[in-house]
Image: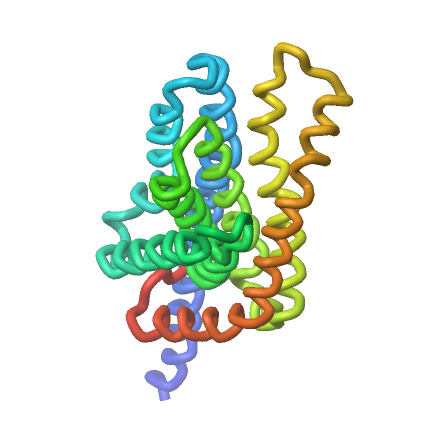
Amino acid sequence: MRKESENPSEKSTEGIAENAVGRTAEKKAGKSNIINIIILCVLSPIVIITGFFLFKGKNYYIICAALTVISMLPFFISFEKKKNASRETVAIAAVIALAVASRAVFYMLPEIKPIAAVVITAAVSFGYEVGFLAGSMSMLLSNVIFGQGIWTPFQMLGLGAVGLIFGLLFSSSKYRYNRWILGISGGVVTFIVYGLIVDFNSVLMLSADLSLASVVSVYIYGAPLNLVFGVTTAVCLILFGKPMIEKTERLKTKYGIFEKG
């Protein structure tokens, strides 16, 4: 009878200990996420804008190198703590390769590129860190084909920001399987966020003769191309987003990669 009376207390003690460990892990994960978001959202724009004025539109490869390091920091800071770090690295490389290929295949069609859709599906499945890294690196590498320039860091930040947003908003949401919500939001975010960041490069080029009218004219001039890119992203996500996410989710479960907590 004594053993039976002691079992519930032992179980409750174990439960309390497990809950405490779980809360501690959640707090650490929360702090880590805050640090990562600050690194990506604050440090990246500072590096790009500072580099732009410091090098006066030249030596853009230095800015790209710095942005590449920043993009990798959130993932590699916790690299040693990850159980399947090598598998996750391979998965990230595969996503970046697919994104680069999706842009290169449509070389002759301006702004009709599925690259943002690939980055978004990766971000939704693997998280915001992978979304930002895949977005920035795929733009850098694909510009080997399309041409490098002072616009490259802005393209890296623009597509990286799109991946980060979807990784934060959709990675734990049931709506990631709704092709219409995913597609429409993907098109809108790509049009607005990517367009604003990339066209800001042209705004800075006019810094010597900057005015409200010139800024507005830059964004109006770039709006049609950004709209085509946004619509392409939306269509690709509506048609292929859900099956791609389902496949990547199965890979996560099968190989135990990108586990949270």
133 or 3: which is nearer to us? 133
Q: From this viewpoint, which residue is outermost toward the top?
A: 208
* In the image, residue 63 above or below residue 123: above
The residue lying at 62 percent from left, 68 percent from top is: 175
125 or 138: which is nearer to us? 138
Q: From this viewpoint, which residue is outermost toward the bottom?
A: 1
Percent position of residue 75, x then y: 34, 46
The residue lying at 35 percent from left, 84 percent from top is: 2
* In the image, residue 227 above or below residue 211: below
Give the quarter of the figure containing the N terminus: bottom left
157 or 212: which is nearer to us? 212
Percent position of residue 153, x then y: 45, 32
13 or 213: which is nearer to us? 213
Give the quarter of the figure containing the C terminus: bottom left
- Residue 19: image quadrant is bottom left
Any part of residue 71 in sight: yes
Percent position of residue 140, x then y: 38, 40
Any part of residue 120 in sight: no
Q: On the picture, is 253 further left or further right than 237?
A: left
Q: On the picture, is 101 further left or further right than 205?
A: left
